[in-house]
Image (cartoon, helix red, strand yellow):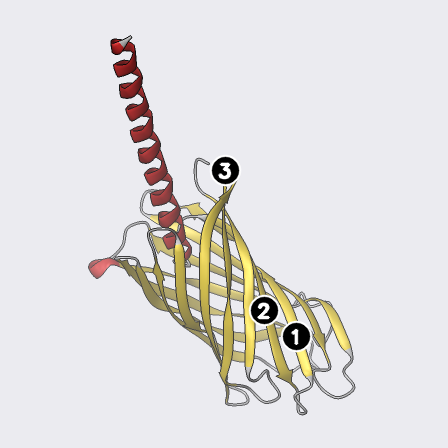
Amino acid sequence: MRKLREYLLVLLAGVTIAAGVATTAVADEQQDLAKQLSNPIASLISVPFQGNYNGQIGPQDNGEQVYVNVQPVIPFSLGPDWNLISRTIVPVVYQDDIFPGAGDQFGLGDTTQSLFFSPNAAGPGGIIWGAGPVMLVPTATDKLLGGGKWGAGPTFVALRQADGWTYGLLANQIWSFAGDNSKPDISQAYLQPFISYTTADAWTFSLNTESTYNWKTNDWAVPINAMASKLVRIGKLPVQFFAGARYWANSSRNGPEGWGARFGLTFLFPKGK
């Protein structure tokens, strides 16, 4: 009987240690996935549904806008040294009273498609980078939901990750080249400096701006986003939930002002899962 008790105690201790190791392994995996989500060109399939709210739109500040960006990120291997990362942004938009008499609109906005060619290995100093083309596709279902133009240009991203921190810059420049002749031409730069910190329990706290500069009207739009995200598992599927506040430090003419919000979730599909 004594030997049986000793055997059971040893077995229980082994099970406890194994469970602890498994729990630690899961926690480490979730932290790693959360870090990868902070990298715009990680070799990880993800599908974010990013909700946004903007207010005080229009000459009388009466307009408001709610939109969800569906943003699938899909990596493709180009051999042992390079990846091709596809990043697509498809907005689903509802807006109301963006100028007097505009009424409300609901539907798709214009689609932005980016392709980044990125080395598999980080460069000197741990720099991760990617570059390639970006295209604007006039998929808007209402003339007030898009620019009505085809556009294209270059895009690039550079970042570094160390000790839980991620910081870098994503940028692009789009020029219109075809489309609705009644719509103004597009020449717009996009700058997104970003910084984030991921904790051991897969919380991520981030700060960025998504600034645009309209070369035609010489207008800056500068929203500042502060976000908190948590990666969890629903069954075996990793999902990141996020929410935060936005403040318009500068706005284009008749654009959003004051405070807004961002919220949503991201589905992850790690390789081999």
For label 3, the residue is 236
Along the line of sight, the residue nearer the viewer: 137 or 16: 16
Q: For the image shown, how many numbered marks are present on the structure?
A: 3
Residue 12 image point, x, y percent: 32, 23
First in sequence: mark 2 vs mark 1: 2
Q: Which mark is residue 65?
A: 1
* 46 up-or-down from 111: above or below: above
The residue depicted at 55 percent of the width and 80 percent of the height is 259
**Horizontally, is 88 left or right of 168 in the view?**
right
Three-letter code, disc 2: Asn
The residue depicted at 34 percent of the width and 56 percent of the height is 199
Residue 82 image point, x, y percent: 35, 49
Using a 10 Å C-alpha cutoff, classify the residue at mark 3 as few (fewer than 14 neighbours), some (14 to 19) or many (20 or more).
Answer: few
Three-letter code, disc 3: Lys
Under circle 3, the secondary element is loop
- Whether residue 71 appears in this view of the structure is no
Marks 3 and 2 sit apart, C-alpha to C-alpha, by 28 Å
Q: Quadrant of the N terminus?
A: top left
Find residue 53 and report its image quarter.
bottom right
Along the line of sight, the residue nearer the viewer: 108 or 36: 36
Under circle 1, the secondary element is strand
Three-letter code, disc 1: Gln
Q: Are marks 2 and 1 in contact (CB under 8 Å)?
A: yes
Q: Are marks 1 and 3 in contact (CB under 8 Å)?
A: no
Using a 10 Å C-alpha cutoff, classify the residue at mark 2 as few (fewer than 14 neighbours), some (14 to 19) or many (20 or more).
Answer: many
Residue 41 image point, x, y percent: 40, 56
For label 2, the residue is 52
